[in-house]
Amino acid sequence: MESAKEIAQYVFGHYPQLMNDVERRAHRHQSGAMKATLGRSDVQAQLEARTHHEFSTWLSNDPEVLSVTASGYDAFVERVAARIVNEHADQVFFNRCSECGGLARTPTARQCRFCGHDWHV
């Protein structure tokens, strides 16, 4: 079975339209920091990214954005995904295999990545 991190990545990756404005800006901020520092997302990386000539424009000075990104990218993704599932449960579809129960790669996938079961019509 998949981990909480994998479920969070599924929700975060496939339902970005359910993010609020602060979360969108925070995601851009985190992406800029990670690109500028080769994958790091901690507060120190965010500070270092401010000196990068290209990605510094992606960063925010908004205290609310800085607050939600202070714990790094993984914690941010898990918090956003949890909020999305709690507030928009009726819009989030967990596409699970009918044979093994594994979570498919995408909400529209028709073949299980774990057992190979195919449910194409």
Image (cartoon, rainbow, N blue to C red):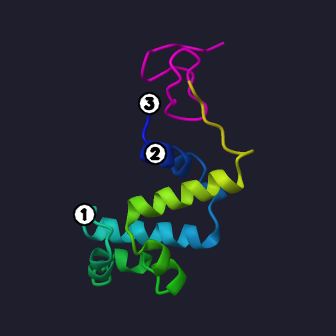
Q: Locate the C terminus and report the quarter of the image it occupies.
A: top right
The boundaries of the magenta stretch are 97-121
Q: Amino acid at mark 3?
A: Met
Q: Amino acid at mark 1?
A: Leu
At 48% across and 66% down in the image, what residue appears?
27
The reply to whether residue 117 is in sight is yes
Vertical side of 31 occupied by 109: above or below: above
Q: Is residue 107 shown in magenta?
A: yes
Q: Locate the N terminus and report the quarter of the image it occupies.
A: top left
Determine the CA span between mark 2 and mark 1: 25 Å
Determine the CA span between mark 2 and mark 3: 10 Å
Q: Which mark is residue 4?
A: 2
What secondary structure do most residues of the magenta stretch adopt?
A: loop
- Location of mark 1 (residue): 38
Q: Regarding mark 2 in the picture, which secondary structure is present there?
A: helix
Vertical side of 9 occupied by 96: above or below: above
Q: Nearer the viewer, residue 26 or 68?
A: 68
Q: Regarding mark 1 in the picture, which secondary structure is present there?
A: loop
Q: Regarding mark 3 in the picture, which secondary structure is present there?
A: loop
Residue density around tag 2, few if under 14, some if 14–19, many if 20 or more, within 10 Å: few
